[in-house]
């Protein structure tokens, strides 16, 4: 009887370890979808094979965060240089106008904001940003975060976290780092496997 139990447990363990996901999915229960650039496949851990890049509209850890910035309109508040390169998904296309001091992402409707990621080409300005918000069309003076938090991901990438009590209509980035911006990614949260809205942190 004991041999049967041990064999059954071993068989169950082995079965769980060798369970393969369908192509394009990963995770313990195959609950996460691959979002690799150019439809590249991801491995069993979710890492993109042959590329570290996510498909346009996705970013972050294992490309699991939906980018709201691509749905918005990026405007150049202080530079004549086109700023749509900030949402093209290419972290090597960057602003070059040293006079650029502010850019904004605006949507047609209010969105939930939890965090944003910025990529710069000059590491010395990585955290030299102020982030503010316009909550609705009637607001003329931007609001700031009560407790803004910057997290350095690497020498050219940082995440900005802010707990807002309401949705926002526009996100404004200002400061010494704007001229060095390459990419802006904005997330309103992450869907968990059961499709409930949850915050990143």
Image: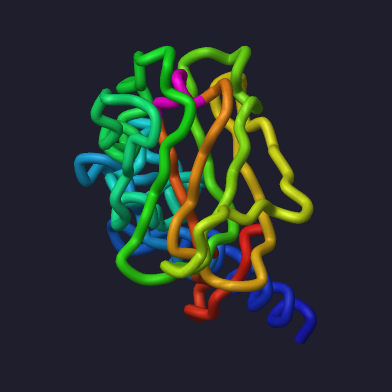
Against 6, residue 183 (above or below) is above
Q: How is the image coloured?
A: rainbow
Residue 164: quarter of image = bottom right
Residue for point 31% across, 22% down: 93
Against 141, residue 100 (above or below) is above
Residue 179: quarter of image = top left
Residue for point 73% across, 74% down: 6
**181 falls in the magenta region:** yes
**146 falls in the magenta region:** no
Q: Position of residue 114 (x, y in %)?
A: 59, 59
Q: Position of residue 50 (x, y in %)?
A: 32, 30
Q: Position of residue 37 (x, y in %)?
A: 27, 40
Residue for point 31% across, 30% down: 90
- Give the magenta part as a residue range: 178-182
Q: Does residue 86 appear in the picture of this structure?
A: yes
Q: Residue furthest left?
A: 38
Q: In which quadrant will I find the N terminus?
A: bottom right
Q: In which quadrant will I find the C terminus?
A: bottom right
Q: Position of residue 23 (x, y in %)?
A: 28, 58
């Amino acid at each position: 009887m004991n041999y049967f139990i041990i064999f059954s447990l071993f068989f169950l363990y082995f079965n769980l370890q060798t369970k393969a996901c369908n192509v394009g999915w990963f995770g313990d229960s195959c609950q996460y979808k691959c979002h690799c650039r150019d439809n590249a496949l991801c491995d069993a851990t979710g890492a993109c094979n042959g590329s570290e890049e996510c498909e346009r509209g996705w970013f972050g850890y294992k490309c699991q965060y939906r980018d709201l910035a691509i749905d918005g309109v990026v405007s150049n508040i202080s530079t004549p240089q086109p700023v749509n390169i900030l949402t093209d998904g290419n972290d090597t296309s960057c602003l070059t106008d040293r006079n650029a001091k502010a850019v904004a992402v605006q949507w047609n409707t209010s969105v939930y904001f939890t965090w944003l990621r910025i990529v710069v080409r000059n590491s010395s300005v990585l955290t030299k940003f102020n982030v503010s918000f316009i909550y609705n069309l009637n607001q003329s003076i931007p609001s700031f975060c009560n407790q803004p938090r910057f997290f350095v991901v690497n020498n050219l990438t940082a995440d900005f976290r802010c707990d807002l009590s309401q949705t926002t209509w526009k996100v404004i980035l200002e400061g010494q780092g704007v001229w060095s911006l390459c990419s802006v990614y904005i997330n309103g949260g992450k869907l968990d496997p059961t499709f409930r809205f949850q915050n990143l942190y």
